Image (cartoon, coloured by chain):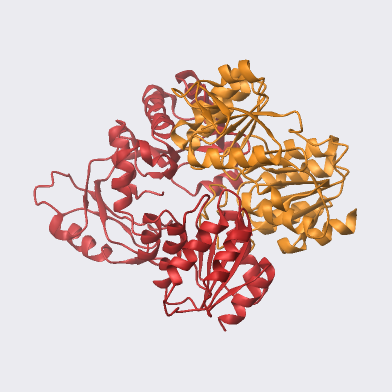
């Protein structure tokens, strides 16, 4: 789950990581006249897309009139398809140097990776491409962690200003704690700046590991403020993994790999998937019923393909779910069903005993995809 | 020979008293797997359908000689369960649990590697089966058949699909293995490929990958240099739009890293026959054996 800048900075504050003094607003009326901030102020669009500065989503106001003007300008702006619904207004910093730092998991090394560069404030992928020696990589063993001498070593290698060594070590150590102890998939600060008031995190990019939601109350609070399509919200509440796509064949399957493969095979037969919907492992009948309900809310769907290969998922329960969702109903679209694997015989029997003229059963994934594509044309 | 498990494998099931654990452990036993014990703290001394329950894996090993752990415990407790199995001396730990936080996975892998010799398969994987010998996990054994093709995959359900395509044209399997799609899997494609290359029963290999990460590219490099047996591959997610996270923590494409086309290119260059549709896997293997 990717956080907005202001949400990331809320976490920074919790971990005593210095950030500029700021206020967050969703409308102009929320701005207190005695906000207590000193000009110049930076007005920053809160959107989850890169390049907002170039798009006019970041402006520096020197007085009340300018602040007023920029709030009006930026709120409601469309930045690369993202509507600006909120702003972070923060005190501008006098920047002496700009650095880059991030913590993430390196999947090939199976270790945490800290990346540090003296060339902050710009596109870090360009730095990695054009002057790779300026990007220091330090691997961290997850069971050992990162200590101050590791950080000092990295600061030296990255040629950061040694006059600020102690402050840098402190802030980097806190960023690591946030990453490692607060279940973040990514913590990135660009720029991490040396300012006239000391070291400060001027931007924040934080991504949270949703699998760890159960042990972090605040994850749910953040989630409430992140806009996602209604259908995805509904699917999530039912324990389904749903992503809206732009085709017309509704897809329900079990296991991300099989569902992705189903999307590919639908394309091979000349169709296009309307969605990705994974009912997960060990789905119950009501999970399948809910999956069909999700597709009913989608106007673009013309035909539905259910592709199940049971392992931990039992085909008999899937069949019960299909029957439950369709029995005695006028179906909006034809459904093609393919069931294989655990208890598939029982599942097919259930469907056979509860015949519905709009449901076609197919024995192979390839054929099922073909039928579903044709049925939607 | 098969790899990792055989007739002599003795399994202790962590979480045998749960619904999923019980359902699949009994299926494994019905298949002929030696499911010798289960664990559940506080329930030691009880039995599930004749299988004795112990409080700890250590107790289970001492009493039954179990050498392989099969883990179904919920995500919040999975790390500790896997480490317990490793400390108790299990040679192989098969972790089925889905939804473990990435930090727990990273620590679990690190500690297991540092402190034990145990091999970890998963988490978030379907386990493995050596047809005719042993099934440890949740794979539907009905679709398998004993034979000479090794199957390895990141995706559970696609493993079944691949196995099914082989069996329906009467091509059997030596061992079928799902390594899982999580950010920090225990055994990698390379670990399994090495096993298949050394295994006398295995004549050809099916490797199923998907978008995201770089495991397939690393496997391609390994195949080029170390695998002489024919390899057929399929990569899922060719049409997945970039930037969308599709379920598996692994299946995410950012930028041009980890795309299906990059993986297909690397594998093709390594001499692997990459098929475009999983239903073509059977025929592709038939062509090489």
Q: How many marks?
A: 0
Position of residue B64 in the picture relative to residue A251 (left or right):
right
One can see residue B179 in this view: no
Residue lying farthest to the right in this orientation: B289
**Extreme residue in the front direction:** B50
Q: Which chain is red?
A: A
Q: In this rendering, does residue A359 appear at all?
A: yes
Q: Is residue B56 left or right of residue B149?
A: left
- Towards the viewer: A257 or B133: B133
- A348 in relation to B3, above or below: below
The residue lying toward the viewer, choosing from A76 and B162, is B162
Task: Tell me which chain appears orange.
Answer: B
Picture coordinates of residue B58, whole percent (x, y): 57, 17
Position of residue A73 in the picture relative to residue B222 (left or right): left
Q: Residue at x 38, y 22 (%)?
A: A166
On the image, the x and y values in percent for residue A345 come to: 63, 60
Return the x and y of residue A353 as percentages of the image width and height. Answer: 54, 70
């Amino acid at each position: 789950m990717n956080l907005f800048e202001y949400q990331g900075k809320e976490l920074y504050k919790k971990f005593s990581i210095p950030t500029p003094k700021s206020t967050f607003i969703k409308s102009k009326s929320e701005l207190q006249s005695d906000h207590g901030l000193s000009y110049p102020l930076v007005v920053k669009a809160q959107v989850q897309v890169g390049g907002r500065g170039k798009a006019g989503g970041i402006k520096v106001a020197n007085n009340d009139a300018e602040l007023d003007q920029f709030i009006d300008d930026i709120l409601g702006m469309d930045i690369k398809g993202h509507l600006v619904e909120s702003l972070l207004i923060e005190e501008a910093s006098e920047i002496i140097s700009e650095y880059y730092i991030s913590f993430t998991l390196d999947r090939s090394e199976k270790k945490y990776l800290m990346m540090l560069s003296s060339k902050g404030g710009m596109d870090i992928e360009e730095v990695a491409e054009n002057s790779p020696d300026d990007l220091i990589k330090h691997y961290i063993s997850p069971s050992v962690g990162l200590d101050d001498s590791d950080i000092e070593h990295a600061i030296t290698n990255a040629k950061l200003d040694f006059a600020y060594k102690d402050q840098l070590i402190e802030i980097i150590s806190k960023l690591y704690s946030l990453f490692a102890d607060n279940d973040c998939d990514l913590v990135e600060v660009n720029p991490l700046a040396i300012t006239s008031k000391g070291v400060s995190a001027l931007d924040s990019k934080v991504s949270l590991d949703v699998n760890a939601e159960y042990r972090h109350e605040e994850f749910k609070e953040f989630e409430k403020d992140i806009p996602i399509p209604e259908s995805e919200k509904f699917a999530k509440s039912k324990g389904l993994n749903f992503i809206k796509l732009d085709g017309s064949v509704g897809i329900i399957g079990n296991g991300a790999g099989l569902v992705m493969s189903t999307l590919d095979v639908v394309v091979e037969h000349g169709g296009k998937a309307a969605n990705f919907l994974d009912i997960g492992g060990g789905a119950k009948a009501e999970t399948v019923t809910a999956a069909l309900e999700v597709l009913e809310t989608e106007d673009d769907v013309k035909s539905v393909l259910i592709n199940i290969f049971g392992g931990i998922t039992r085909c008999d329960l899937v069949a019960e779910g299909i029957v439950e969702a369709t029995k005695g109903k006028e179906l909006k679209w034809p459904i093609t069903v393919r069931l294989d694997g655990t208890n598939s015989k029982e599942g097919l029997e259930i469907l056979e005993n509860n015949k519905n003229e709009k449901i076609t059963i197919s024995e192979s994934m390839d054929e099922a995809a073909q039928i579903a594509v044709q049925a939607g044309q | 020979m098969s790899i990792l498990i055989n007739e002599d494998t003795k399994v202790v099931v962590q979480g045998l008293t749960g619904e999923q654990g019980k359902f699949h452990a009994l299926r494994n036993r019905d298949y002929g797997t030696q499911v010798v014990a289960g664990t559940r703290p506080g329930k030691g001394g009880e039995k599930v359908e004749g299988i004795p329950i112990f409080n700890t894996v250590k107790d289970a090993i001492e009493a039954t000689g179990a050498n392989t752990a099969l883990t179904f415990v919920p995500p919040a407790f999975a790390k500790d369960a896997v480490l317990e199995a490793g400390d108790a001396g299990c040679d192989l730990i098969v972790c089925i649990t889905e939804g473990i936080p990435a930090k727990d996975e990273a620590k679990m892998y690190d500690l297991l590697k540092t402190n034990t010799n145990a091999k970890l398969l998963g988490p978030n994987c379907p386990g493995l089966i050596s047809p005719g010998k042993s099934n440890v996990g949740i794979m539907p054994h009905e679709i398998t058949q004993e034979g000479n093709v090794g199957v390895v995959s990141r995706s559970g359900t696609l493993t079944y699909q691949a196995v099914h395509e082989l069996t329906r044209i009467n091509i059997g399997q030596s061992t079928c293995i799902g390594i899982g799609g999580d950010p920090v899997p225990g055994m990698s494609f390379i670990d399994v490929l090495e096993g298949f290359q050394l295994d006398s029963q295995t004549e050809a290999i099916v490797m199923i990958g998907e978008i995201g990460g770089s495991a397939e590219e690393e496997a391609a490099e390994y195949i080029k240099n170390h695998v002489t047996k024919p390899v057929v591959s399929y990569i899922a997610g060719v049409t997945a739009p970039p930037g969308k996270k599709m379920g598996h923590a692994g299946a995410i494409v950012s930028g041009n890293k980890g795309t299906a086309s990059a993986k297909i290119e690397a594998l093709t260059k390594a001499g692997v026959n990459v098929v475009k549709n999983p239903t073509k896997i059977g025929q592709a293997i038939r062509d090489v054996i």
